Image (cartoon, helix red, strand yellow):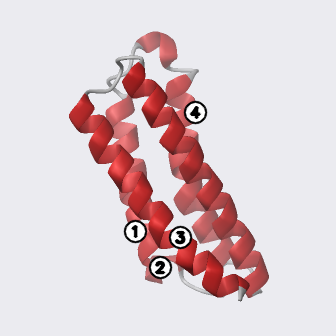
Amino acid sequence: MRDFRDIQAWHKAHALTLAVYRATELLPREEKYGLVSQMRRSAASVPTNIAEGCGRNSEAELARFMEISMGSACELEYQLLLSYELGYLLQADYQKLNLATIEVKKMLAPFIRRLRS
């Protein structure tokens, strides 16, 4: 069992989640139960699954939860693009959040490969 707070990807994913929550406060009210909810769930799923995987008893289980985190990050990446193209996010906000999402994915990928090898 590992402490998720020792994993740098968790810290980046947690910061991304906080940023997504703040950014989605500005989206239209009619998106509260649609895109806002989806983006927040996707963002929170990334560090949540890292934390859950750290509580498991094997490297294989940890790798599986890291892969779920990666999937959630990919989902968020699309939702950010959709929000931007719908005009809900300013370009600067979109770029900042998208770069942070890509950074998390780049941190997860080698960690998953290492766990799977």
- Left or right of 42? Residue 104 is left
Mark 2 and mark 1: span between their CA atoms?
7 Å
Mark 2 and mark 3: span between their CA atoms?
10 Å
Secondary element at image label 1: helix
Which x, y percent locates residue 65?
Answer: 69, 67
Residue at (74, 70) in percent of width and height: 64
Residue where numbered disc 4 is placed: 38
User: Does residue 42 lie above or below 8 as drawn?
Assistant: above
Label for residue 7?
Answer: 2
Give, as a three-letter code, the residue at label 2.
Ile
Q: Which mark is nearer the camera, 1 or 3?
A: 3
Give, as a three-letter code, the residue at label 4.
Gln
Secondary element at image label 4: helix
Along the viewing direction, whichever of 2 and 111 lies nearer the viewer: 111
Label for residue 25?
Answer: none
User: Does residue 83 lie above or below 74 as drawn?
Assistant: above
Mark 1 and mark 4: span between their CA atoms?
21 Å
Marks 1,3: beta carbons within 8 A: no
